[in-house]
Image (cartoon, rainbow, N blue to C red):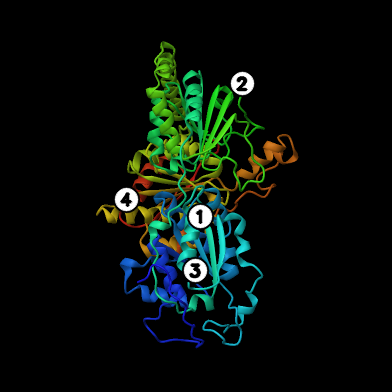
């Protein structure tokens, strides 16, 4: 086969073909995905997909060289599954949806993939471009007129790293690989392709690409001058601080940051994104997760902002005026945010891992800097940091104690989950106002063990947890092992956003067992927090949740909804008090380990 497509032959104009060896744009599209490392395609099919369906059926004959197809009854769940899979593995995945309406059905999932930097390729058909049977794929149904819109890709274009229409089949593989280059280059994110039925039906000459020529853009490290300046600042700092958010997506970053913190004794690390496990909770420098509001920011004299979108919220907390701030990021200008700036003395577009390793190497080998780092003052700060860390953990444990009446909060629930679930459990978190309680008490330590949405589109974690679990099974199968245990921790309102009717049908259909913990606090509490930040003494501050329309009463049967979607084959339970907590958690964990999903409706007390 040639490395580039030979001249195009004229496509047939017949309305159908019985040829089993017909090589179409659609089949070449799937070939391109698989060759580029896309192992799964999550689909929600429609009238624009006849040739896609033909290609999928043909692909069953060679499953070792064709992506696995997963049927998803809802588009947001489909994209969230691809998103979760991609976040854990770093390998982009693909989804197929139906024209403009399916593209709109993606909803907040596109925002989440963009803000959360997850590489996902979205493909949608567009209404046929011919009316009278001029080409195979021409209009045959009433809906083809109704779904014809001026520029379909603009529905999601502002969230995508790249959006384009396939206008011919002869370069479909180049277009797929160009899109994936954008998706995989930093900052990673979603890409969108669309094509008419006629284009996807085209018979084209068979061809291949050399995948070695389609790698993503590679970021470099820091300049020598930048390394010297930042290393010197860190070595001389009394209260150095690293603020990060996304760096842990690269699983080599947490141990690299540990090495930096062990070199600069007294260095603390704050996570203000919660998207990934960036720094282990068992290290004395761990400050945990705080969304842009932590006293360490105001105390620090040197701050390294590392791959982070919101290091602090100036109306709540900001660095002191004499603090030295350095910003290292894959996208330091935040090019998709109309309003963003940091008062930093220097900013660098660089690979975070390379930058951290450069700084650590400089601090370990420069004799002058080594003297500063080996002083008695440094050893004193190290001991103080260890004492502060012990105190922090003790205070977290104290706040998490259950109430005397038998009720329990999110903190106690998460401590019991951490104790009972396997040590290498992966936590898929979408706990909204309870996120800090969850992180404080789960205390993740393993790279890749904590994955949060990273965006603001509620409902990610249902499909996200399934995608993560699926990815662990695929990775484990390649090593003849067993996939990791996955726990979804989600707020009650967010659980409804996740489209559980679709999530648990998929879980049952494809044998993807996860444990879902629904934090039932009877409604949406995030709007109340937002209200109080702007109107702390306003009318709403004195009104009930029912009065401000954020209360869920009566409370839905969350576990029952999931069980119905799974055709009854799901472990479902409600836990109202500590007396039943451990017993039901153990039963649910055993069910999931046995291959059955479980949903626990946990009534949690507020504020803990």
N-terminal of the two: label 3 or label 2?
A: 3
Residue 31 occupies quadrant:
bottom left
Q: Nearer the viewer, mark 2 or mark 4?
A: 2
Which residue is under mark 1?
182
Mark 1 → mark 3, Cα distance in angstroms: 24 Å
At horizontal 67% and vertical 32% (from top left) the residue drawn is 315
The secondary element bearing badge 3 is classed as loop
Q: Give the labeled residue for mark 2.
A: 322
Q: Closer to the camera, 30 or 181?
A: 181
Calculate the distance from the C-alpha at mark 3 to the C-alpha at mark 2: 55 Å
Q: Mark 2 and mark 1: span between their CA atoms?
A: 39 Å
Residue 559 seen in this snapshot: no
> Could you tell me residue 160's position as x and y percent?
57, 56
Residue extending farthest right: 539
SS under mark 1: helix
Residue 10 vs 555, above or below: the answer is: below
Residue picked out by circle 4: 590
* Residue name at image x 36 percent, y 67 percent: 66
Which-is-in-front pick, marks 4 and 1?
A: 1
Residue 588, position as x, y percentages in the image: 36, 50
Lateral position of residue 111 relative to residue 535, left or right: left
Q: Compute the Cα span from label 2 to label 4.
A: 55 Å
Between the residue at mark 3 and the residue at mark 4, the CA separation in whole angstroms equals 32 Å
């Amino acid at each position: 086969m040639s490395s580039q497509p030979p001249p195009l032959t004229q496509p047939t104009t017949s309305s159908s073909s019985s040829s089993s060896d017909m090589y179409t744009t659609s089949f070449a599209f799937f070939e391109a995905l698989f060759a580029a490392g896309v192992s799964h395609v999550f689909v929600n099919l429609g009238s624009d997909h006849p040739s896609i369906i033909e290609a999928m059926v043909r692909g069953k004959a060679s499953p070792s060289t064709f992506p696995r197809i997963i049927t998803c009854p809802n588009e947001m769940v489909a994209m969230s599954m691809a998103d979760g899979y991609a976040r854990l593995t770093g390998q982009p995945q693909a989804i197929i949806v139906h024209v403009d309406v399916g593209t709109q059905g993606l909803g907040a999932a596109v925002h989440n993939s963009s803000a959360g930097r997850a590489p996902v390729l979205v493909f949608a058909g567009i209404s046929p471009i011919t009316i009278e049977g001029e080409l195979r794929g021409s209009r045959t149904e009433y809906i083809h007129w109704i779904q014809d819109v001026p520029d379909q890709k603009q529905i999601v274009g502002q969230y995508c790293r790249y959006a384009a229409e396939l206008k011919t089949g002869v370069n479909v593989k180049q277009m797929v690989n160009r899109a994936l280059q954008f998706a995989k280059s930093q900052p990673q994110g979603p890409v969108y392709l669309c094509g008419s039925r006629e284009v996807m039906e085209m018979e084209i000459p068979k061809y291949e690409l050399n995948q070695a020529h389609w790698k993503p853009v590679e970021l470099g490290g820091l300049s020598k001058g930048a390394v010297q300046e930042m290393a010197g600042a860190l070595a001389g700092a009394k209260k150095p601080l690293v603020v990060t958010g996304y760096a842990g997506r690269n699983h080599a970053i947490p141990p690299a940051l540990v090495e930096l913190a062990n070199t600069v004794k007294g260095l603390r690390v704050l996570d203000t994104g919660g998207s990934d496990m960036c720094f282990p909770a068992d290290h004395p420098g761990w400050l945990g997760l705080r969304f842009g509001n932590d006293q360490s920011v105001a105390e620090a004299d040197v701050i390294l902002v590392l791959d982070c979108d919101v290091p602090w919220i100036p109306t709540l907390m900001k660095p002191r005026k004499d603090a030295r701030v350095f910003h290292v990021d894959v996208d330091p200008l935040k090019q998709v945010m109309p309003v963003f700036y940091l008062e930093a003395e220097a900013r660098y577009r660089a690979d975070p891992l390379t930058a951290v390793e450069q700084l650590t190497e400089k601090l370990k080998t420069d004799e002058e800097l080594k003297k500063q780092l080996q002083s008695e003052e440094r050893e004193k700060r190290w001991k103080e940091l260890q004492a502060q860390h012990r105190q922090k953990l003790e205070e977290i444990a104290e706040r998490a104690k259950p109430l005397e009446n038998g009720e329990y909060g999110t903190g106690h629930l998460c401590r019991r989950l951490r104790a009972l679930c396997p040590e290498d459990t992966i936590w898929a978190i979408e706990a909204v106002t309870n996120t800090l309680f969850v992180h404080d008490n789960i205390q993740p330590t393993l790279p890749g063990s904590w994955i949060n949405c990273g965006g603001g589109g509620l409902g990610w974690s249902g499909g996200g947890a399934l995608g993560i679990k699926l990815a662990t099974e695929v990775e484990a199968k390649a090593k003849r092992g067993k996939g990791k245990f996955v726990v979804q921790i989600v707020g009650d309102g967010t659980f409804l956003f996740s489209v559980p009717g679709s999530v648990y049908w998929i879980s049952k259909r494809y044998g993807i067992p996860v444990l879902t913990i629904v934090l039932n606090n009877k409604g949406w509490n995030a709007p109340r927090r937002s209200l109080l930040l702007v109107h702390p003494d306003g009318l709403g501050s004195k009104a009930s949740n029912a009065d401000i329309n954020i209360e869920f009463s009566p409370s839905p049967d969350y576990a029952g909804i999931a069980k119905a979607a799974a055709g009854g084959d799901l472990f479902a339970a409600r836990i109202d008090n500590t007396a039943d907590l451990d017993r039901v958690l153990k039963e649910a964990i055993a069910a999931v380990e046995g291959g059955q999903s479980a949903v626990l409706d946990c009534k949690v007390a507020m504020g803990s």
